[in-house]
């Protein structure tokens, strides 16, 4: 009886552990302000880049599907206003991978963003 309980418990624990599968997303793009390199733009998965191009890849282990979102924080055309402009880009689920390194075809390429533009859902954030 004890052996059956131990086997059942082991099976449940393994099911939970294996249920937390590795998931990741890879995003790349280029950020400009009035056609010029815009340095020190914060792109979450916290990356402070010195050039306008970025390539980010992050993974996590979760039981449920991840819902990846890219946030870009910047001060392009912002004068001396407090906080920063925040651009949110939802990453399509087809770019979610289940391995440690994405293939070239699995990168979500946002292309070139001109940060002087206003984007749908853009807001301001002081907490980045």
Image: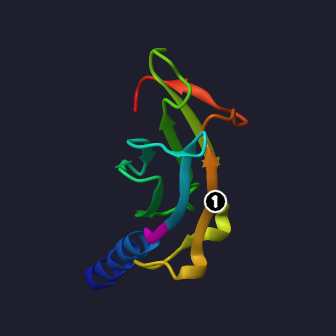
Q: Which residue is drawn at 41% across and 42% down?
A: 42
Instruction: State whether residue 89 is above or below residue 54.
Output: above
Secondary element under disc 1, as helix, strand or loop, is strand
Residue range highlighted in magenta: 20-24
Q: In this view, does 120 lie to the left or right of 73?
A: right
Please say if 110 is above or below 82: below
Colour approach in the figure: rainbow
> Residue under circle 1?
111
Query: Residue 94 lies in what quarter of the image?
Result: bottom right
Q: How crowded is mark 1: few (under 14 residues within 10 Å), some or many (20 or more)?
A: few
Decide which of 122, 59 is in the foreground and name it. 122
Residue 74 place in picture, x, y as percent: 49, 34
Q: Which of 4 and 106 is in front in this view?
A: 106
Residue at (44, 47) in percent of width and height: 44
Q: In which quarter of the image is the N terminus?
A: bottom left
Q: Where is residue 118 in the image (x, y as percent from the top left)?
A: 69, 32
Up/down of 40 relative to 4, above or below = above
Magenta stretch mostly in which secondary structure? strand
Image: 108 above or below 6: above
Between 96 and 21, the one lying in front of the other is: 96
Q: In this view, does 119 lie to the left or right of 70?
A: right
Query: Residue 66 vs residue 3: left or right?
Result: right
Residue 40 in picture, x, y percent from top left: 38, 42
Residue 15 at x, y percent in the picture: 43, 75
The residue sitting at 43% across, 41% down in the picture is 41
């Amino acid at each position: 009886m004890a052996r059956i309980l131990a086997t059942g418990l082991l099976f449940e624990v393994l099911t939970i552990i294996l249920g937390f599968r590795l998931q990741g997303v890879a995003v790349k793009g280029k950020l400009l302000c009035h056609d010029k390199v815009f340095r020190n733009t914060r792109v979450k998965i916290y990356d402070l880049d010195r050039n306008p191009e970025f390539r980010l890849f992050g993974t996590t282990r979760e039981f449920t599907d991840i819902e990846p979102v890219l946030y870009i924080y910047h001060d392009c055309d912002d004068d001396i206003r407090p906080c920063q402009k925040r651009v949110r880009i939802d990453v399509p689920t087809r770019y979610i991978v289940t391995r440690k390194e994405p293939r070239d075809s699995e990168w979500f390429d946002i292309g070139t963003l001109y940060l002087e533009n206003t984007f749908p859902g853009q807001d301001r954030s002081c907490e980045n």
